[in-house]
Amino acid sequence: MSNIFNDVEIVHRHEEFIKKLMQNELTIPNEFTVEMGKLIRAAREEAGISQTELAEKLSKRQATISDFENGKIEIGILTLVQLAIVFGKPISYFVPNMTFLVSISDIHNKMEEEALALFRSMEYQGDPQLALRLLKTLDEYFVDTRDQEWGIPDEGDENQFSQ
């Protein structure tokens, strides 16, 4: 039951956030900028780089990176693009999961996000056609393997109904 109350409280907080946003009454830091900062910090720590190293990659000051991570600055879309490139993650990774931003089509599991990040890394740093061919080959392999496990005959198997 406490989970339901927690969900209701979150929805209420997000409704208040939208109200303030639409009335241009948001202050910085706010829940959105703080949560975005946590995601930036997590990506930076996962990459094993310091704030100073990230600042150099983005042509920013270390203090600016600190302000990003603490939610003290609203981050522009071009900076989000830079972060996505540096960390090999989709821009959506850096957008906090707030109830008003989530739709069914936006929900992804962690493996899907990781696979997409790996594909984007191959796409940006290597041969995008090769990356796509590898994914298609894996898909074909898994379909063939599943068909064999489930006893589904090959499409070209003329003896599929004779037994």
Image (tube, rainbow, N blue to C red):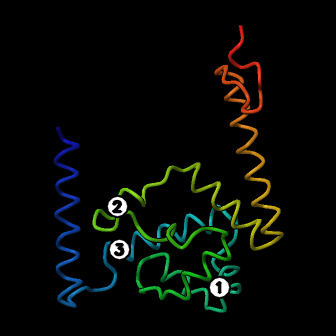
Residue sitting at x 79%, y 57%? 133
Q: Secondary structure at mark 1?
A: helix
User: Mark 2 = which residue?
Assistant: 103
Q: Secondary structure at mark 3?
A: helix
Report which residue position mark 3 lands on.
32
Identify which residue, 100 or 83, lies in the foreground: 100
Q: Is residue 105 above or below residue 2?
A: below
Q: Amino acid at mark 1?
A: Ala
Q: What residue is at 41 percent from the left and 78 percent from the top? A: 71
Residue 110 in picture, x, y percent from top left = 54, 50
Circles 1 and 2 in contact, beta carbons < 8 Å:
no
Pointer 1: what residue?
A: 55
Near mark 2 (Cα within 10 A), the count class, few <14, some 14-19 or many ≥20, is few
Q: Earlier in the sequence, mark 1 or mark 3?
A: 3
Question: What residue appears at the point 19 percent right and 82 percent down from the top-left corner?
Answer: 20
Q: Nearer the viewer, mark 2 or mark 3?
A: 2
Amino acid tagged 3: Phe
Residue 31, percent from left and from top: 32, 72
Could you tell me which quadrant the N terminus lies in? top left
Between the residue at mark 1 and the residue at mark 3, the CA separation in whole angstroms equals: 22 Å
Which badge, 1 or 2, is on the more N-terminal residue? 1
**Left or right: where 109 falls relative to 54:** left
Between the residue at mark 1 and the residue at mark 2, the CA separation in whole angstroms equals 33 Å
